[in-house]
Amino acid sequence: MAKVLLIEDDAETAEEIKAELADRGFDVEWSGNGIEGLDKARSSQPDAMIVDRLLPGMDGLTVIETLRKEQVRTPVLVLSALGAVDDRVRGLRMGGDDYLTKPFAIVELVARMEALLRRPAESRETTLKVGMLEIDLIERTAKRGDRAIELLPREFRLLEYMMRRADQLLTRAMLLEEVWNYKFVPATNLVDVHMGRLRHKVDGSGDAPMIHNVRGAGFILRAVS
């Protein structure tokens, strides 16, 4: 059972999060202010943390920054009503691993927590590279060589997932579960539609293909040899 520390001063929001995570099998500990939350993070050694940005006593980003300076690498999901790009970037640069803007769907929060817990320990990279293809996980930008690639949020998540698993065959069922958070495989061409758009953007005119369709099986992302 994964142990999660929730630092959130709004009791109603905290109760909703605690109830949903408990139903999914998480062991949740709650703190309502930053100072107490920092103490619990140090003493209880949770597997993951959910930290609200605006907290009494000590703000959430200071809590995270303090833990990172102490070499605590527990994955952290930052919650905030501040959704501007600069606010998200600051939250990630201060040591957060993911950022969710309020109001949010509780199912998305659960999915993001599950994704954080699946990451390898000490996974703190801010860029991913496969050959000439590169994405910046903080700025949410992508480029192939010197060519910038404009991606929609879902396309970015799809490309990030593929780049973390370069040279691996990824089935449609895997992509639906991990990128779209489906717990079943619906009869849909959703993956093919998005993959077609992504391939058009990544494999531009004149470029050697990097995204390959394995007929009847799935897709593979490979660096150009």
Image (spheres, rainbow, N blue to C red):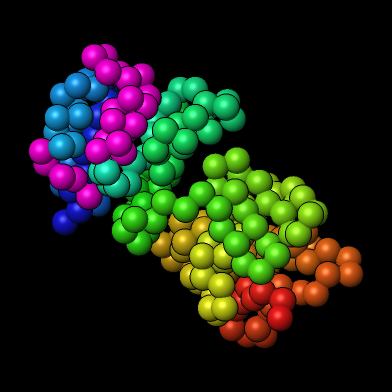
Q: Is residue 52 visible?
A: no
* Residue at the spot 51% in from the left edge and 70% down from the top edge: 165
Picture layout, residue 114 above or below residue 34: below
Q: Nearer the viewer, residue 55 or 14?
A: 55
Residue 55 figure quarter: top left
Instruction: Judge left or right: residue 125 versus residue 2.
Output: right
* Residue at the spot 55% in from the left edge and 48% down from the top edge: 137
* Residue at the spot 34% in from the left edge and 31% down from the top edge: 65
Q: Is residue 11 magenta?
A: no
Q: Nearer the viewer, residue 215 or 99?
A: 99
Q: Is residue 66 magenta?
A: yes
Residue 19 figure quarter: top left
Q: Which residue extends farthest right? A: 206
Expressed as whole percent of the image width and height from the top left, the position of residue 30 reads: 17, 32
Residue 206 figure quarter: bottom right
Picture layout, residue 70 above or below residue 188: above
* Residue at the spot 47% in from the left edge and 36% down from the top edge: 93
Q: Nearer the viewer, residue 211 or 26?
A: 211
Instruction: Judge left or right: residue 33 versus residue 146.
Output: left
Expressed as whole percent of the image width and height from the top left, the position of residue 28 reads: 17, 41
Expressed as whole percent of the image width and height from the top left, the position of residue 199 reads: 74, 65
**What range of the chain is rendered magenta?**
43-70
Q: Is residue 71 visible?
A: yes
Expressed as whole percent of the image width and height from the top left, the position of residue 40 reads: 14, 33
User: Could you tell me which quadrant the N terminus lies in?
Assistant: bottom left
Instruction: Judge left or right: residue 121 versus residue 157.
Output: left
Picture layout, residue 133 above or below residue 61: below
Q: Which residue extends farthest top? A: 56
